Image (cartoon, grey):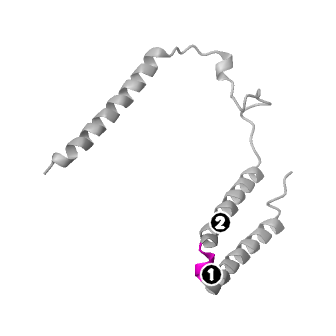
Amino acid sequence: MLDGYIPLLMLFGVVLANAVLMLGLSHLVTSTQPTPVKGDPYESGMPALGSTKERFSVKFYLVAMLFIIFDIETVFMIPWAARFTELGLLGLVEMAIFVVILGVGLAYVWKRGALEWD
């Protein structure tokens, strides 16, 4: 009855042994000598401009969240476009309503000034 679980347990044992071995070897092989260069933040190969503790404006995060929201909502159009011919007129009306809701949301955000970058 439990014979079917033996390969699964063996796989789990190999994975666990591999993880422990890799962590152990990484601690044995690496040297930990902190230097000022190692402590500097690395960003795309460019030296850091200014302090890393600088605060960002809330507008930055708001624009980022709005981009993600509208990007995810437009991804919903891909399956609709793939099945457009099968959905017929009802599918077209539903997508038109969806696009109108997106447009109203965009108009609201635009009117509130959330997309203005200072």
Residue drawn 64% across the image and 15% down it: 35
Could you say where residue 41 lies in the image, as x and y percent from the top left?
A: 68, 28
Q: Which residues are magenta?
A: 83-87
Which label's residue is closer to the chain start, 2 or 1? 2
101 or 35: nearer the viewer: 101
Q: Quadrant of residue 83?
A: bottom right
Could you say where residue 108 lies in the image, as x and y percent from the top left?
A: 78, 70
Mark 1 nearby-residue class (10 Å; few <14, some 14–19, many ≥20): some
4 or 43: nearer the viewer: 4
Q: Are marks 2 and 1 in contact (CB under 8 Å)?
A: no
Could you say where residue 64 lies in the image, as x and y percent from the top left?
A: 71, 53
Question: In this rendering, is residue 87 above or below 19?
Answer: below
In the image: residue 114, left or right of residue 12: right
The type of residue carrying mark 1 is Gly
**Label number found at residue 91:** 1
Residue drawn 77% across the image and 48% down it: 57
The number of numbered badges drawn on the structure is: 2
Which label sits in the foreground, 2 or 1? 1
**Label number found at residue 73:** 2
Secondary structure at badge 1 equals: helix
Question: In this rendering, is residue 86 above or below 52?
Answer: below
Residue drawn 68% across the image and 18% down it: 37
In the image: residue 113, left or right of residue 67: right
95 or 61: nearer the viewer: 95
Secondary structure at badge 2 equals: helix
